[in-house]
Structures are given as C-alpha cells and as structure tokens.
Image: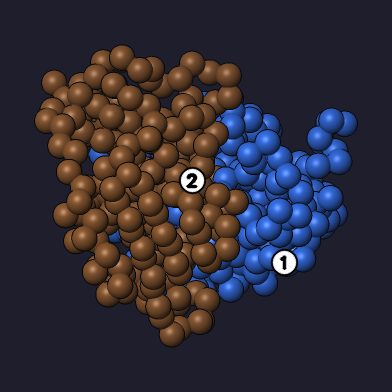
Chain colours: A blue, B brown
Amino acid sequence: MSKEQEIAAAAPTAETLAPLIAGTIFEGKVRHFVTLGSTSAAAMQAGGDGAEAGTVWIAEEQSAGKGRAGHTWQSDPRDGLYCSVLLRPKLSPADVIITSLAAGLAVVEAVHEATGLWGDLRWPNDVLLGNKKFCGILTELNAEVTRVRYAVIGMGINVNQPKFPPELREIATSLRIEAGKAFSRVAVAAALLNALDGEMKALEAGVERARERILRRFEERSSYCRNAPVWVEEDGGYEGITRGLDARGFLQVETAKGMRTVLSGGVRKR
Amino acid sequence: MTERTKGTKSKTAPPQQAAPRQNMNQNEIKELIEFLVEKDIAEFELERGEIKLRVKRGYAVVQAPQAAPAAYAPAPAAVAAAPSAKAEAAPVVESGVEWIKSPIVGSYYEASSPGAEPFVKKGDKVAKGQVLCIVEAMKLMNEIESEFAGEVVEILASNGQPVEYGQPLFKIRVH
C-alpha cells in the first residue's frame, strides 16, 4: 500500500479524530460504525432518548442513507464521509433554520482547508464542483413552537470515489475526481467538525450578527445566489433569475409574475 | 416574498386567515400583525363582515439584514387599530380545543415522503408527542409533534402548501 493509499484508507474514528477536535463541542463524542442504516436516523433516535449535544455519528457505509423527499443517498464503503451531528441549540425554531446554510458553509470551508478546493453552494446547501454535486446535507429538527429540543445535521461528502455509475456521472463527483488524487477522510472530518463548531458557537453567541455573517459569506461562496437563471422545484416548478437571499436566508427569485421566495425546493441552473 | 403577498402593499388576507370566518379575536389580530411584520408588509387593509382593520407600519431603517429585527415592535398605528376591531368582534372561544401551529416558515408535508401514507387523518386519535406532519424550510425537516392527546378534528393545511410562522395546522379536541 502506498503512502497515499494509507492516508485515504484511514477511518475517521473516535481515536483518529480525538487529537484534531479537542476543544470543540464534539470532543470525546464521536461514534464510528462500519455499517449503519442512516447516521441521521441513529442521531434522531438518540436525540429523543436524551443523548448528549455534540454527539457525532460516522459510518463507513450506510445501507439506508436518506436525502430530501425520500431520495436515497448512495454511500460507498470507505470512499465517502457520512456524518451526522446531534445539536441542542439554544435557539428558537425560526432562528435555527439558518444552520441549514451554515452547515453548507462549514463544508465549503472544511473542504478548502483539507483539499484546497473551493466548492460552490447551491441553495440551500448542496455543494458542487464543476456543477456536479459532491456533498448533500439534510437537517432534521425536533421542536416545539418556541423551543428546539434537538436538531440533527446529516452530511454526506464524496471524498475518494474513483468514479460514478453512468446514471450519476453527469451530476455527481468526488473530491478525488476533481483533484486527481485521494484525500484523508480523517482530515476532512476534522476540518468539518471544527468548522461546524465555529458556526454553532457564533450562532449561540448572537444569532442576529451570526446570521448576517452567514448570509454574506453564503453569497460569496455561491454562484447560484444572484443573477443565475434557475428552475425552482417547488409549487409545481417555475423559472426565474436569482436575486440574492432575504434577511432570513430564503432565496429570492424574480419571475415573470414578480419576486418569489423559495422556501424549500431545490434549484437547478437553466 | 411569496406570490401570495405581492409587494409591500397588500389588500388580501394572509393565508392563515383563509378560513371563511367573520370574526377575529385579539390573538388572531396579534398574529396577523406579526405576520405582516415578518413579511415586511408596510400597509394592509382587511374588511370582513363587521370588521375593518387597517395596519400601517413605519420605520426609518432601510439596511436590509437589520430591517426585520428593527421592525419587530409593531408600529403604534397597528396597536391602535386592534382595540377597535376587538370591540366589534365577538372572540371565538371553544373549550377543549387546541391548535397546533407551525414553528417555522416552510412547506407543509402530510407524509414522510411523497406517496407515503399521511401521518394523520381527520378523525384520528393522537397521542402527545405523535408526529402530525413535517414543515420543511431550506432542506431542514421539522417534524411537528402533537402537544396534546386528543382527536384531530381539522387539518388546516394541504400537502406541499407554504405555511407561515405561527399558522394553525391542526385543530385538536383534547381528551
């Protein structure tokens, strides 16, 4: 095994991550699995059972990885990073939705730190390289009207997949495909947990200021945010030109019938 | 801004007022004002039965990200409008009934995935903590649980519909 293969093969376990995530809210709370149905399902279950905030689930392989609207997420053994974190933020549900954008930013910055590549954010939080997706994020919330009980951010990052099946080749990519070399998943995971730690601490220190900063950075890191002709998969589907984010982080799209706010749908460039 | 609340002036009722009821109580007026503030709607008029409600908000700040928090205190005009409407409206009080409201702005889903069985149907008995629906915003899926044990007597949103913060989603007859 070459040095590069060894680095790529190292698993992001509690032991390998421990020295790299000291001082974060995740320190001492990483649970690593060879196979898990879904890291987010496990985290939501544990959240309901009272697990500690900051607990992290990482799986080498997911047999039932989930995406939005019942989409599945292909999880190849050992090539990807499949990671869910349990949070109990002291934020209202209305304030906590910004973590969806913050998680995307954390991935972009972590990937840059670990690989030198700058991902492009597709609202709300897909991360792309060369218009192909390498990271998907799904956040789940358990909340009362005024209080968040717990939230789980689930992230799937294609790190070392050498190639994808034909039906995915045009829309999916990995860091390895884009850079032409394999990367340490330990380094990517550590950078990600550190970046998430920073985002959550900033939000809890002052949500208004943190939100403004998130919105500004999101626009800097997204080619989709402004003046992009897009198709919006919401409300039967419609097309328009993106006009930035509103104060809450919702994407504004100018259509023939006026400005519309995208609440939940994905967007595609036309 | 969604299509249902075009521009900064609106003469139509916001979505949570869609139920064809003639009267508004103080809470509903308060919610309406909060909705207008959240949506940044500057002027609003509503005529329904005996009620005539006019809300006009004013604020000097035009700096986008800070506008929302600065505007959170409803302008005096709005507060002044409320009592007169209240005087004419007979408050609707139903005992033994609770409303489940949306904690976030988002899209309402009746099932965990498209094509799956709805979490609950009208007439279903629900337990405290049982999931009733999902509201999604920015790919954040919020499972809404029932805060009460009881019977679902009304479902006020339809699958895929946009819902506002504080909008009633379910009417529960509490057991």
> Which chain does the residue under circle 1 lie in?
A
Q: Which mark is residue A226?
A: 1
How many other residues sit within 10 Å of disc 2, few (<14), some (14-19) or many (≥20)?
many
Q: SS for tag 1?
A: strand
Pick whichever, B159 or A17, lies toward us: B159
Gap in Å between the C-alphas at discs 2 and 1? 22 Å
**Is there any visible trace of residue A249 in the rendered image?**
yes
Q: Are marks 2 and 1 in contact (CB under 8 Å)?
A: no
> Horizontal placement of A261 versus A158: left or right?
left
Taking the spot 36% from the left edge, 65% from the top edge, the residue there is B55
Taking the spot 58% from the left edge, 73% from the top edge, the residue there is A216
Q: Residue B113 falls in which quadrant of the image?
A: top right
Q: Are the residues under marks 2 and 1 on the same chain? A: no
Task: Indicate whether B168 appears above or below B11.
Answer: above
Q: Residue A73 falls in which quadrant of the image?
A: top right
Can you give x and y, in whole percent of width and height, for residue B94 in the image? 15, 32
Quarter that holds the C terminus of chain B = top left
> Horizontal placement of B61 versus A239: left or right?
left
Q: Which mark is residue B106?
A: 2
Quarter that holds the N terminus of chain B = bottom right
Task: Indicate whether A181 appears above or below B162.
Answer: below
> Horizontal placement of A121 versus B88: left or right?
right
Q: Residue furthest bottom?
A: B60
Q: Residue furthest front?
A: B50
Can you give x and y, in whole percent of width and height, for residue B54 in the image? 36, 63
Q: Amino acid at mark 1?
A: Arg
Taking the spot 27% from the left edge, 75% from the top edge, the residue there is B76
Q: SS for tag 2?
A: strand
Can you give x and y, in whole percent of width and height, for residue A97 in the image? 45, 54
Q: Amino acid at mark 2?
A: Gly
Can you give x and y, in whole percent of width and height, for residue A227 in the image? 77, 66
